[in-house]
Image (cartoon, rainbow, N blue to C red):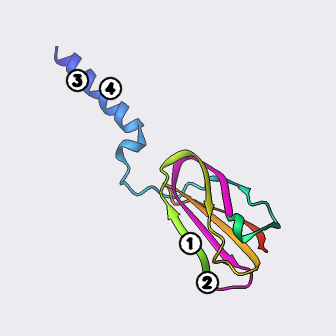
Amino acid sequence: MKFTKLLASVVAVVSLTACEDVFEDGSLQPDGSKPALTIRNPTNNQKLLKSSGLRVKLTASDKDKVKELQVRVRAVGGDADHINFTTMPDKKILEFDTLLSATELPQGDYTLRIDATDYRTNVATDEVLFSVK
């Protein structure tokens, strides 16, 4: 009986130590695997009317889940964001589709920048240029 308990204890210890996630210190370090990020809209060099708004459509995915998605719009050569917001999707696969108001954007050229961060603090960035007429 003692041998059975000892054997069960040894098996349990070996099983638990084989799983590194059980003993992690809680701070997930970057693993070099950035989220996959694709901006589907606007397309690069797209021209849009203020009245139509800015449709932002993208796909982000990561094996550790997409923790944070930051959306920024800045005039080309500018130093301040006209639009800047962050969402916390907490999903492995994120389909993001929203319509932003463009009425406050002066006519000109802009950069849409998207940053997707996973739970291991890996960051993927994608940018597209577009114009407001």
Disc nearest the viewer among 2 and 4:
2
Cα gap from disc 2 to disc 1, whole angstroms: 10 Å
Cα gap from disc 4 to disc 3, whole angstroms: 9 Å
Which amino acid, mark 4?
A: Val
- Note whether residue 107 is visible: yes
For label 3, count other residues whose C-alpha is less than 10 Å away and answer few (under 14), some (14-19) or many (20+): few
> Which residue appears at 77% of the width and 69% of the height?
130
- Front in this rendered view, residue 78 or 120: 78
Cα gap from disc 1 to disc 4, whole angstroms: 52 Å
Q: Which residue is mark 1?
A: 84
**Extreme-top residue of the structure:** 1
**Extreme-left residue of the structure:** 2
Cα gap from disc 3 to disc 2, whole angstroms: 65 Å
Tell whether position 71 is magenta.
Answer: yes
Question: Horizontal placement of 120 versus 78: left or right?
Answer: left
> Which residue appears at 61% of the width and 78% of the height?
82
Q: Please identify the dominant SS of the magenta region.
A: strand
Helix, strand or loop status at disc 1: strand
Helix, strand or loop status at disc 2: loop
Quarter of the picture holding the C terminus = bottom right
Which amino acid, mark 2?
A: Ala
Magenta-highlighted residues: 54-80
Q: Which residue is mark 4?
A: 11
Which amino acid, mark 3?
A: Leu
Disc nearest the viewer among 3 and 2:
2
**In the image, which disc is placed on residue 80?**
2
Dot placed on the residue nearer the N-terminal end, 3 or 2: 3
Dot placed on the residue nearer the N-terminal end, 4 or 3: 3
Q: Which residue is mark 3?
A: 6
- Note whether residue 33 is visible: no
